[in-house]
Amino acid sequence: MNPFPATRLLFALALAAQSMNVLAVAPGRMFDKTVLAINARDEQGNVLGLTQHDDALSALPEALRITPEDATDAAALVSAYRELLHIKTEDVDAWSNLGDLLASLDRYDDAILAYREALRINPEHATAWNNLGSVYNSLERYDDAISAFRQALRIEEPDDPYVWYNLGVSHAGHHQYDAAVSAYGEALRINPHLAAAWTNLGIACYDLERYDDSISAFRHLLRLEPENADGWYNLGTAYAVLDRHDDAIHAYREALRINPEHGSAWLNLGRSYNLLKRYGDAISAYRAAVRVDPKRAKAWNALAITYVQSGNLAAALQAVEGLRPIDPAEADKLLKQITRPGK
């Protein structure tokens, strides 16, 4: 029998207490015998209490199933943290944990305040600096993010690949691609198996028009994650810009084997086939692209033009009509282009 009233607030309090080390976690996930005494009220105003270690411990497994999608529980957990911070006002980890919780709920401004409070208490708290930087990244405040990540690296985490990776994201967001490549490179020097860093390195090299380096990065990624559809797609785009269309086709085909609903892969596959004058294959790819996403104007446009190239004007006109509900002006322009005399 459940030893306490069936309210999720108790679970939220238990999770908050565990996170704040009111119940200390020892090796092997055992808890010490600290007695937890927290009072709150349920919806009917009844006083609730977790006054026994065993009650709190039994609440934790359910508490750990709380998700940010459950707004009621999330609000209860935030409230629980704030109540506990009245008791432990200078607990740096509690403030940092509260920041993590608020960030997970997309309450970024509140998260920043919590991390700032943690850093007021301990300016050398590297984790708080890193997580503060991540929130700044989410807000596209890249200068602030870069400063925060550099603080984390200065303090105690020069060999943390995730901080270097986050720093790379900040530089890339700021269009500082050379700096981003350098940061991703540091992350991969420390952890060559960090797939996200290989992905972003490939993208940054592509943006720098370093296409061979981009291909190399994506191939490294695919050695780690051979079933990564976006990785194959990105590899295909890098091959295509170098006019290596046979290689691009293979890469797009791999992306589509893994994810047949990848509309961009169908569209780019059609382009590579078209450039090789394999119009029948291009038409099949474009038709798949508009099947996956009927509102993709570029696919309808490309389909109409490829039908013209293949000598099928009637089908081209049908493709123009597929484009019309999406972009009437472009449909009119395309119609004039494919029906003008001598075309």
Image (cartoon, grey):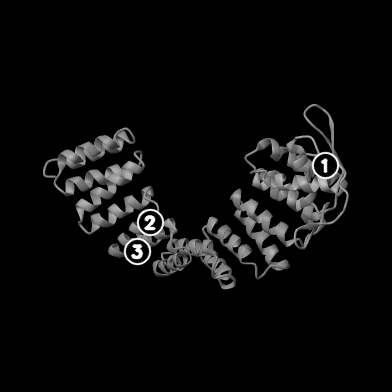
Q: First in sequence: mark 1 or mark 2?
A: 1
Q: Nearer the viewer, mark 3 or mark 1?
A: 1
Q: Secondary structure at mark 2?
A: helix
Identify the residue at the far front of this view.
1
Q: Look at label 2 and name its amino acid.
A: Ala
Query: Horizontally, is 163 left or right of 114 in the view?
Result: left
Please tell me in which quadrant of the rendered image residue 6 appears: top right
The residue lying toward the viewer, choosing from 85 and 338, is 85
- Amino acid type of disc 3? Tyr
Mark 2 sits on what residue? 255
Residue 237 image offset from top left, x and y in percent:
37, 59
Q: Nearer the viewer, mark 3 or mark 2?
A: 2
**Label 1 neighbour load within 10 Å: few <14, some 14-19, many 20+:** some
Q: Position of residue 313 (x, y in %)?
A: 15, 41
Q: Which mark sits nearer the N-terminus, 3 or 2?
A: 3
Q: Which residue, given by chain and number where applicable, does mark 3 sit on? A: 239
Q: Tag 3's secondary structure?
A: helix
Q: Quadrant of the C terminus?
A: top left
Decide: is 39 above or below 169: above
Label 1 SS: helix
Amino acid at pointer 1? Glu
Residue beneath the point at 38% across and 47% down: 261
Q: Is residue 169 in sight in this rendering? A: yes
Residue lying at 60% horizontally and 55% vertically, measured from the top left: 142
- Give the distance between the C-alpha atoms of the residues marked 3 and 1, in whole angstroms: 56 Å
Q: What residue does disc 1 label?
A: 83
Residue furthest top as drawn: 44
Numbered mark located on residue 111 in the image = none
Mark toward the start of the polypeptide (3 vs 1): 1
Residue 118 placed where, x, y %? 78, 54
Q: Nearer the viewer, residue 177 or 4?
A: 4
Quadrant assignment, res 110: top right
